[in-house]
Amino acid sequence: MSSDRELRARSLTLSEAVTDPLIDTIDPDNFTPRLLALLSNTLVWRESHELRRRFRLGTNDWRVISALAIRPGASATEVSDFLGLNKAVVSKSVNTLLRRDLVLLVDGPRGSRPMYLTRTGAEMHDAMLPISLRGQEIILADLSEDDVDRLNRLLRRMLEKTRELQTLENEALAAAENAPLPG
């Protein structure tokens, strides 16, 4: 590890810094991925803040509860895939929910561990649901029913395209890793 002195000795002077904005940049007010991310981050922050204040649970805990309400008996891996969350994030939430007696794990076939909401977990789901639905209301407030249907179709199609692209990129990466070295 470098010492502070070595880091300072290697640091560039201000004359090496680009101090003017670059010409070819993203228009932040019209870059759709940025706008979607900002909206998502704002909604998640609002939801998380309210869930923590009222229930001492976070958004990821709510997502696991909601997934099990939709898919009782799902394993942690299945919940992770369904939510598009890292398995470690789901595992942490599952442990929190187990400690709170909101979910239970049972022994399943071939070593699987199906998860279910407890009665208390189902009650928690019903209490948390309006907070999540409020985010939906914020998004859809200015849209007609046809607009909502079209938006949801477009979003599902975009998600499918990103999944397909990720699969292609993973396959290309695997092929490159398995390719013989030149020479």
Image (cartoon, helix red, strand yellow):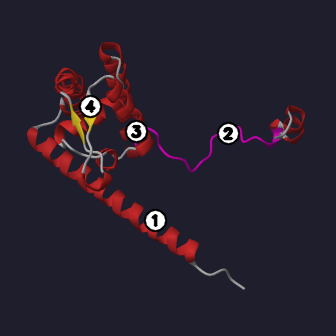
Amino acid type for the residue under numbered disc 2: Asp
Mark number, residue 143: none
In-front residue for pair 84/116? 116
In-front residue for pair 94/64? 94
- 126 lies left or right of 63: left
Going by the picture, which residue comes out furthest to the bottom? 183
In-front residue for pair 104/59? 104
Classify mark 1: helix, strand or loop: helix
Tell me which numbered mark, 4 or 2, is placed earlier along the sequence.
Answer: 2
Tell me which numbered mark, 3 or 1, is placed earlier along the sequence.
Answer: 3
Mark number, residue 20: 2
Task: Write down the residue under mark 4.
Answer: 103
Residue 70: give x, y in percent of width and height: 17, 40
Q: Quadrant of the C terminus?
A: bottom right
Tell me which numbered mark, 3 or 4, is placed earlier along the sequence.
Answer: 3
The residue under the point 16% across, 35% down is 143
Amino acid type for the residue under numbered disc 3: Ser
Relative height, residue 24 to residue 69 (above, below): below
Residues in magenta, as a range: 15-30
The residue under the point 32% across, 28% down is 97
Frontmost of labels 3 and 1 is 3
In-front residue for pair 17/36? 36
Residue 71: give x, y in percent of width and height: 19, 43
Tell me which numbered mark, 1 or 4, is placed earlier along the sequence.
Answer: 4
Amino acid type for the residue under numbered disc 1: Asn
Distance between mark 3 and mark 2 Cα atoms: 45 Å
Tell me which numbered mark, 2 or 1, is placed earlier along the sequence.
Answer: 2
Task: Write down the residue under mark 1.
Answer: 170
Pointer 1 local density, CA inside 10 Å: few below 14, some 14–19, many at least 20: few
